[in-house]
């Protein structure tokens, strides 16, 4: 029997099937920087296993390692762990469960990539054998308060807009390839300061810390397990969080609440809100923050123009999208605060 190694169902069919599920799912993530001899072979193997276990999500595989965010049926969780332990390259990989459950993914994507984090760095600019020291939640909280410490948010600006660590410096870039050069620029003249890096799950800080060390930054440290592991640990130990607001996540949930603080504003009216949305107009889909009132008023669209266009007959919308001028290329809404 030939095993199908990619999805053939439509988006709507997949979503309908997800909505009919009677069981719970566990959202989790894992990554590992480790040499992969045959990424395509591993890709096909992982796809076959994950499809058989009804796992949804994204898995990126490159010669440098594996990066995954997935949703596992709860009744297959033990089997999933057993299967992971059979794969030599990732058998000891730490798996982090999500903080808040909810519908996260509706299909399975497993791809071979050039990098598992798209920084676009040439190999002479980093050395994964030399990365920043890992700090646990207690150590990170203590280090934040030390004099001359610099805290850098290694995520995209729209992620930090809804949640971040106390006194964190935010690189205002929209593309991953712009991030590391911008962070290095921000640290010019401060190469000897203690630099603390953090991101969602830790993967972005691994290569970033190596890049910064090789570029002459002398005291780089990183939050072990990222914001996800930090939040789990402070809750377990009853420690006050120095991260405030929401942790943005790249799935249908678009965020996990860490504290009750709302540090962002609705991009339409300016009222406090930290709920991210994709504009409902198919020619837009810009990512933006919107309060409940504006979402109701604009039917989940980012503007009156998009609301008007989204209300037109589907066939008319399709004709409009044939003209490149009617396609909104901007991917993210940049807050006036930034």
Image (cartoon, rainbow, N blue to C red):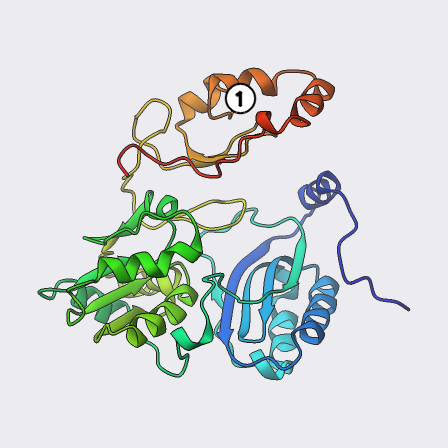
Horizontal and vertical percent for residue 64?
53, 75
Q: Up-down: is 190 above or below 101?
A: below
Which residue sits furthest left?
147
The residue depicted at 21 percent of the width and 62 percent of the height is 187
Q: Is residue 302 above or below residue 150?
A: above
Q: Say if residue 43 shows up in the picture.
A: yes
In the picture, the quarter occupied by the N terminus is bottom right
Residue 136 visible (yes or no): no
Write down the residue under mark 1: 306
Q: Position of residue 313 (x, y in %)?
A: 70, 16
Q: Residues within 10 Å of mark 1 (few under 14, many from 20)?
A: many
Residue 188's image quarter? bottom left
Residue 183 pos. (x, y %): 29, 59
Q: Position of residue 48 (x, y in %)?
A: 74, 68
Q: Residue at x 55, y 71 (%)?
A: 66
In the rendered image, the quadrant that contains the C terminus is top left
* Foreground of the two, 23 or 102: 102
For the residue pair 135 and 313, the one nearer the viewer reads as 313
Q: Is residue 147 left or right of residue 241?
A: left
Residue 109 location, quadrant: bottom right
């Amino acid at each position: 029997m030939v095993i199908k190694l990619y999805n053939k169902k439509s988006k709507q069919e997949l979503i309908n099937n997800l909505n009919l599920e009677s069981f719970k799912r566990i959202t989790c993530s894992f990554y590992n920087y480790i040499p992969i001899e045959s990424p395509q072979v591993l890709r096909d193997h992982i796809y076959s296993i994950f499809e058989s276990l009804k796992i949804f999500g994204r898995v990126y595989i490159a010669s440098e390692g594996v990066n995954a965010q997935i949703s596992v049926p709860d009744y297959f969780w033990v089997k999933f762990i057993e299967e992971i332990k059979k794969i030599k390259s990732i058998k000891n990989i730490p798996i982090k469960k999500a903080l808040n459950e909810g519908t996260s993914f509706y299909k399975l994507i497993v791809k071979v990539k050039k990098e598992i984090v798209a920084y676009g760095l040439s190999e002479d600019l980093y050395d994964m054998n030399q990365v920043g020291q890992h700090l646990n939640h207690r150590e990170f909280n203590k280090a934040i308060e030390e004099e001359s410490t610099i805290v850098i948010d290694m995520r995209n600006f729209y992620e930090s807009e809804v949640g971040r660590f106390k006194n964190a410096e935010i690189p205002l870039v929209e593309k991953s390839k712009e991030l590391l050069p911008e962070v290095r620029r921000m640290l010019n003249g401060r190469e000897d300061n203690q630099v603390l890096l953090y991101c969602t799950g830790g993967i972005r800080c691994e290569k970033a810390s190596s890049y910064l060390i090789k570029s002459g930054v002398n005291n780089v440290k990183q939050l072990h397990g990222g914001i996800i592991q930090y939040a789990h640990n402070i809750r377990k130990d009853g420690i006050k969080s120095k991260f405030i607001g929401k942790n943005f996540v790249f799935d249908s949930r678009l965020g996990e609440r860490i504290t009750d603080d709302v540090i962002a504003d609705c991009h339409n009216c300016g009222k406090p809100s930290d709920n991210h949305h994709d504009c409902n107009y198919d020619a837009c889909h810009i990512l933006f923050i919107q309060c409940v009132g504006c979402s109701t008023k604009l039917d989940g669209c980012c503007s009156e123009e998009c609301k008007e266009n989204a209300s037109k007959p589907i066939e008319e919308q399709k004709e409009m999208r044939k003209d490149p001028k009617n396609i909104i290329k901007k991917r993210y809404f940049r807050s006036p605060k930034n």
